[in-house]
Image (cartoon, rainbow, N blue to C red):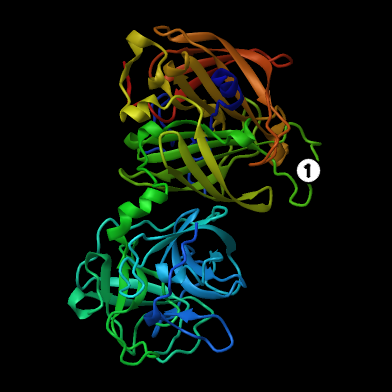
Amino acid sequence: MLRTQLLRHATVMFLAATAAAAPGLADAQPKIKGFSDGRPVSSLRQVPQAPMIKRPKAGGPTITQRIVGGTAVPAGQHPWVAALLDGNQQQGCGGSLIHPRWVVTAAHCVNAFSAFVRVGSVDRTAGGQVIAVTQRIIHPQYNATTAANDIALLQLATPAVGIAPIPVATAAPGVGSTLHQMGWGSTISTGNGGSQFLQQINTNVLPLANCTRNTGAGSLCVVGNNVASACWGDSGGPAVFNGALVGAVSGTGNPFGNPVACNMNVLYANVANYRNWIYQWVPADRPLTREHSGLWYQPETSGQGQYVEIRPEQSVVIVGWYTYAGASLSKPAESKQVAPRHRWFTAQASYAYGQTASTLTVYRNTGGNFDAPPITQPVAVGTARLTFQSCTSGRLDYDINLDGTPRKGSIPLSRLDSAQYCQQGWTPNFSFSQQGISPGLDGAWYDPNTSGQGLQFAFLPNNGNLATLAWYTYDVNGQSAGSDGQRWYTISGTYTPGSPQVSNLQIYQNSGGNFDAAPITTATPIGTASLSFNSCSQASLTYNIPGRPVRTIQLYRLTGGANCQP
C-alpha cells in the first residue's frame, strides 16, 4: 500500500540553483529559489461571571475591560489578536490565537462571549475571518470570586487561514519589563463603550504585592491608571513580551473603589504558568529538525503533495509543492481543456536551530522547456508557514496568488515515508563508497544548463529500499505557455543497497486534480529511467519517454549532503 501511495506522491521540488558554483559543488549558502542559478530575483462548563470585570453596556451586550490611552493598531498587524463574539457576533472580550484552531482567553469571558471569534482584522465589527467555537475548556481550578486561574481555551470549528499564531511564553516577564497590550475597549477610564478598532499600549510589570487581588504564580500585576490601562472590554486580551504571549487580562488588581473607573493596576493571568495545562489540549508545535525532511501529503487530496527539506548545514528550509491549477470558486470543477493542469512551487526560508515554525516565501517558475533552455527565474507569489506537531503530522498554511487568484488555506500534512529517523532523533551518516545509494544522497539536484527546473531525491531504506524522485520541469513547448507550461513527474523503483546505480525506475504522470482539493488522482506510467551516481555530489539520469529522444541529464547536488561521506 505504501508503495502505491509513494508512486502517487513521490515529490520533488525544483529548487533554485546556487550562484554560479563549480558544477557539483553546492554553495555554502545557496540561494534556493525555484532552481534558479542564484542571480538576484527579485465542551462548555457553565460558571458564574466574575463581577469585578464587567459592566452593562446600555442597549447592548455586556462589555468587559478595555484599553485606555492607546493608539490604533495599523491594519494588517497582529492578526492573531482575537475578538470574542456572542451569538449575534457582538464583541465583548479579547483573546489570542496560539494555534490555527485554538484561542487563549479569560475564563470569565466564556459564558457570554464564545460563540464565535474574529481574527485577522483590527475592526471588531468587520473583516478577517469569523469562525465558530466548538469546544470551550475552562481551567478546572477557576474561581470566579477570587479570579484565581482565570484562563480558558476555545477550540475553533475550522483553522484560521494564513495567520501566524503567537507563541506561548515559556517564562513570566520580570518586574519592570515592558508589555505590549492590545484590546478594543473603552478609551477613557470612566468607560465609553469601546473602540471599533484595535488599540495598543505599552505598560510595565509590577511586583505582585501591587495587586492585592493576585493569586500567586498564576497572576501578573501590570501598571494601570487614568492615563494608560486595560479597561472595560479587554478581558481575555493579550499582553506580549519579546514576541510571546505572557498575559491574558483578568481584571482590576485591587478591590473596587469606583466600579466604573479603570484607574488602578490590572491583573493578568500569567500565561506561562499555565503552559503545561494549555498543551494538554493544544497540539504543540515541535522544533523543526533535519529529521522532519521527507515526503508529506494530505490523504484527502492524494496525488499531490510536498517534499520538505530542513538543512541545518545550509541554514535553510525548503519545500517543493506539486499540485494542480485551481478549481473554480463558483463551480465544483473548472474546465480541464489544458491537460494535465500541473502547477508546482518552491518555498524557502532561513533556518535557525530550535525554531517551531518557518515562514517561507513561495516562488513559481514559468517560461521553460522540457530538459532544455532557457534558464528560468523564480517569481515570489506569496508566503507559507510550516509547522510540525509530531514526526508524522504537520501543517502548511499558505497565502499565495494562483494564476491571478488569491488563495489562502491550511493543509494538514501526513507523513508518507518512514518516520524512523525522526522518532530516534538523529540521522546516521552514509558512506558512498561502501553503501552506494542511500539517504545520504537525498536532496535537490539540477543541471546548471537548465537552471530553473530539476529533481529532488528520497531514498528510503525503511520503506523497502524505495527510490522516489520528483521532477519539476516544463512541457516540451512550455516556454510560451505561462503557468500551463509547467509539468511535474514522479519517478519510482527499488534500489539495491551497495550499488551506486538503479535502472528499474518508472516515470509516472498524474492529471485531473485541483489545487488543494479533490479529486484524488492516480499515477499513469509514461516511461522509464535509470539513475547513476559518481559521488556524493554528481549523478546522471537517463530517461526514455516514448515520442521523445532518449537523453541523459548530468546532475549536480544543490541541497543536502551533510550526511554523505565519500
Residue 348 in the image: x percent, y percent?
Answer: 46, 43
> Could you tell me which secondary element the residue under label 1 belongs to?
loop
Q: Can residue 32 be seen in this view?
A: no
**In the image shown, does 330 or 336 lie closer to the viewer?**
330
Q: Quadrant of the C terminus?
A: top left
Residue 397 in the image: x percent, y percent?
Answer: 53, 48
Name which residue type carries label 1.
Glu
430 left or right of 88? left
Identify the residue at image location x=44%, y=30%: 558
Residue 201 in the image: x percent, y percent?
Answer: 37, 78
Residue 224 in the image: x percent, y percent?
Answer: 30, 83
- Is residue 462 placed above or below 249 in the rendered structure? above
Q: Read off the residue under disc 1.
A: 334
Image quadrant of residue 322?
top right
Image quadrant of residue 538?
top left
Q: In which quarter of the image is the N terminus?
A: top right
